[in-house]
Image: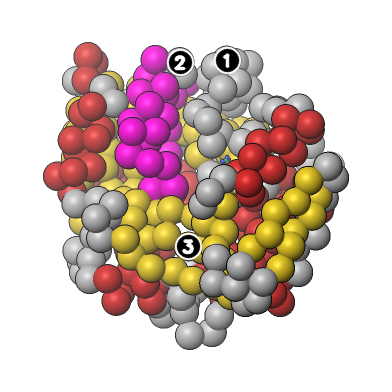
Amino acid sequence: MKDSIPMFVLRTQEPDDLRLSAYAGLMSPQAEVSPAFFYDALGSHLFGAITLLDEYPATREELEIFSVAHEAIAKQLPTGCSLIDLGAADCAKAARLFGSILPTGYLAVDVSEAYLREALESLSERPGVPAVAGLVVDFSRGLPPNCLEGRVPGNGPRVFFYPGSSIGNFHPAQATDFLRGLIREHQAAALIIGIDLIKPARLLEAAYDDALGVTAAFNLNVLRVLNRSVQTDFEPADWRHRARFNQEASRVEMHLEARRDLEIRWPGGGRRFKAGQTLHTENAYKYTEASFEALLNEAGFAVAACYRSRSGGFVEFVAHPATAA
Ligand SMILES: C[S@@+](CC[C@H](N)C(=O)[O-])C[C@H]1O[C@@H](n2cnc3c(N)ncnc32)[C@H](O)[C@@H]1O
């Protein structure tokens, strides 16, 4: 029988604090919710379905980069490294790189606990997989100090892997702080990070509002997760999915728009929404190659190499702490 996979579960907020910060977001003048609430098991499966949509090329483009450049990427990394996958989901992208990077260990980090457990169990059945472990944590306020200590299999130089343009969920200033923290608090030896580039608004909007309505279901699922985790009484049928590219801020915004005047209640409070008012559920910031390189530099990283997809829509950076470059 296989040894069980080490799974570490770190709560960054007490349940009461989680509830209070969720209610504060719902009460803001522009109601908002943290995108971490998208990802229960259903949300993770819906995201997996999004990656298969014609309108959503980012995943295919990043995998294409890996199939062309996996050896070149590996050459930029310290040997015997431990790979730390931020927002690992099904771990499929990291698994594509194992054969060239040859990590001594792999730590998959994600907020979606049940989905991560399943992904690691099936990953560990495969040949050529290093020692693996899982860390369940919400890193929306940064990766907590010391959360990696004693938890990184292989204990090699730490290579952080942050694919899927997920860094785009952070405002650029927060993204900079998050990445700086990888060097200052978590001894990053290198970073591999994938970025979806700015493209025409119609392409960006279609990527977040597909014809089959899969992204709409993903967005609406946040209401189920809120109901379950912070006892709100959202009725998904009362809400409509909206996605638009905010050119000035360089971000795709996802919202849920009330279809009628309604009131949402939770223990000790509530809020009225007029028809047409929205709940802001996600930002996905888009960059140019140059603007993201500047952000990396600001965070203390120097770019060692960068690889573009054939269509030019997606770029993968390999970067090192500038002081070690
Ligand atoms: C857009 S998906 C990307 C998945 C995969 N890395 C890829 O590139 O296809 C974002 C992943 O990050 C996880 N995630 C999102 N917000 C998170 C947070 N605040 N803390 C930890 N994980 C988070 C989600 O559960 C999900 O698996």
Q: Residue at x 46, y 18 (%)?
A: 186
* Residue 82 on image: x %, y %: 48, 28
Please identify the quadrant where the C terminus is shown: top left
Side of 144 where 4 appears, left or right: right
Secondary structure under badge 1?
loop
Please identify the quadrant where the N terminus is shown: top right
Query: Mark 3 or mark 2, which is nearer the start of the sequence?
Result: 2
Q: On the image, numbered disc 1 is attached to which residue? A: 146
Side of 282 where 75 appears, left or right: left
* Residue 14 on image: x %, y %: 76, 27
Mark 2 → mark 3, Cα distance in angstroms:
32 Å
As displayed, is residue 96 above or below residue 215?
above
Residue found farthest to the left: 290
As displayed, is residue 74 above or below residue 180?
below
Side of 290 where 141 appears, left or right: right
Query: Mark 3 or mark 1, which is nearer the start of the sequence?
Result: 1
Q: Amino acid at mark 2?
A: Glu
Pointer 2 and pointer 1: residues touching (CB < 8 Å)?
yes
Labelled disc at residue 185: 2
Side of 250 where 179 appears, left or right: right
Secondary structure under badge 2?
loop
